[in-house]
């Protein structure tokens, strides 16, 4: 139990979310049987990936954290960060001429959660670093990705259609895709059905 607590602490989740506290009634597109199957964690043993897509506030990050939390509880090493944070971490390593060392260090994690891909566009060098991260983990370790943009928009997000195509190819080869639909249930709780703009200053799907 103490080991699980340490793994959860080191994962650096923004909040602790579980499948049990997910409101399936407002998000029928989240296929409960599929999520419960993923919660058995065979995909992590297989070094496969999970990709969550959908508008802001539909529960993408909640579900990604729930699966990652379950992985921590069952002995997996997990690290959580937004796409921007991962890129920043790799940029700092590159500035110290330690990019290869950092990528190798991250191989020790069974699962990396890359949250909010597409929230902000990336410069080409940043896109290359994100590609390096995904490429390094291909068939070596799992990634859970959340994005408010479909793959068809990733060329625009990453500023390079070729890099986007190569990244997507590696990400989806062994992956489960889950698309969430509907209105933000954060806003539904406040009595409005208007989804927030993708440019809103705060976009965290941890509700």
Image: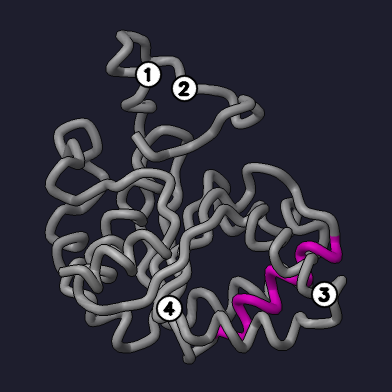
Label whose residue precedes the other's in the sequence (4 or 1): 4
Is 139 above or below relative to 144?
below
Above or below: residue 59 compared with residue 95: above
Identify the residue position indicated by label 2 in the image: 195
For mark 3, give the secondary structure.
helix
Residue 207 appears left or right of 159: left
Q: Residue at x 48, y 37 (%)?
A: 204
Observer-side mark, 3 or 2, equals 3
Residue 69 occupies which quadrant of the picture?
bottom left
Residue picked out by circle 3: 94
> 10 Å neighbourhood of mark 1: few (<14), some, or many (≥20)?
some
Q: Which stretch appears magenta?
A: 124-137
Q: Main secondary structure of the magenta part?
A: helix
How crowded is the residue under tag 3: few (<14 C-alpha within 10 Å), some, or many (20+)?
Answer: some
Between disc 3 and disc 4, whose residue precedes?
3
Does residue 137 appear to the left or right of 165 in the view shown?
Answer: left
Say if 181 sits above or below 192 in the image: below
Distance from the alpha carbon under mark 4 to that under mark 1: 32 Å
Asked if the stretch drawn in magenta spans residue 34, the answer is: no
Label at residue 142: 4
Q: How is this picture coloured?
A: one colour
For the residues marked 1 and 2, what is the alpha-carbon distance in whole angstroms? Answer: 7 Å
Does residue 130 show up magenta in the picture?
yes
Viewer-side residue, 27 vs 19: 19
The picture quadrant where one finds residue 24 is top left
**Is tag 1's residue or tag 2's residue first in the polypeptide sequence?**
1
Mark 3 or mark 1, which is nearer to you?
3
> Could you tell me residue 162's position as x and y percent?
78, 72
- The quarter of the picture where the C terminus appears is top left
The residues tagged by marks 3 and 2 sit, at their Cα atoms, a distance apart of: 38 Å
């Amino acid at each position: 139990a103490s080991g699980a607590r340490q793994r959860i602490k080191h994962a650096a989740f923004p909040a602790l979310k579980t499948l049990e506290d997910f409101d399936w009634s407002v998000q029928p597109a989240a296929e409960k049987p599929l999520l419960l199957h993923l919660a058995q964690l065979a995909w992590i043993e297989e070094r496969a990936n999970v990709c969550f897509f959908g508008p802001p506030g539909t529960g993408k990050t909640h579900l990604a954290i729930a699966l990652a939390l379950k992985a921590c509880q069952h002995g997996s090493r997990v690290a959580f960060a937004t796409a921007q944070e991962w890129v920043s971490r790799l940029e700092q390593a590159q500035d110290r001429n330690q990019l290869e060392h950092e990528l190798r260090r991250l191989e020790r994690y069974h699962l990396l959660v890359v949250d909010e891909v597409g929230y902000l566009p990336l410069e080409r060098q940043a896109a290359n670093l994100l590609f390096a991260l995904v490429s390094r983990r291909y068939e070596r370790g799992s990634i859970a990705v959340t994005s408010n943009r479909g793959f068809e928009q990733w060329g625009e997000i990453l500023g390079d259609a070729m890099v986007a195509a190569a990244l997507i190819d590696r990400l989806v080869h062994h992956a489960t895709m889950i698309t969430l639909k509907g209105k933000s249930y954060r806003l539904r709780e406040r009595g409005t059905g208007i989804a927030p703009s993708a440019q809103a200053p705060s976009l965290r799907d941890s509700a």
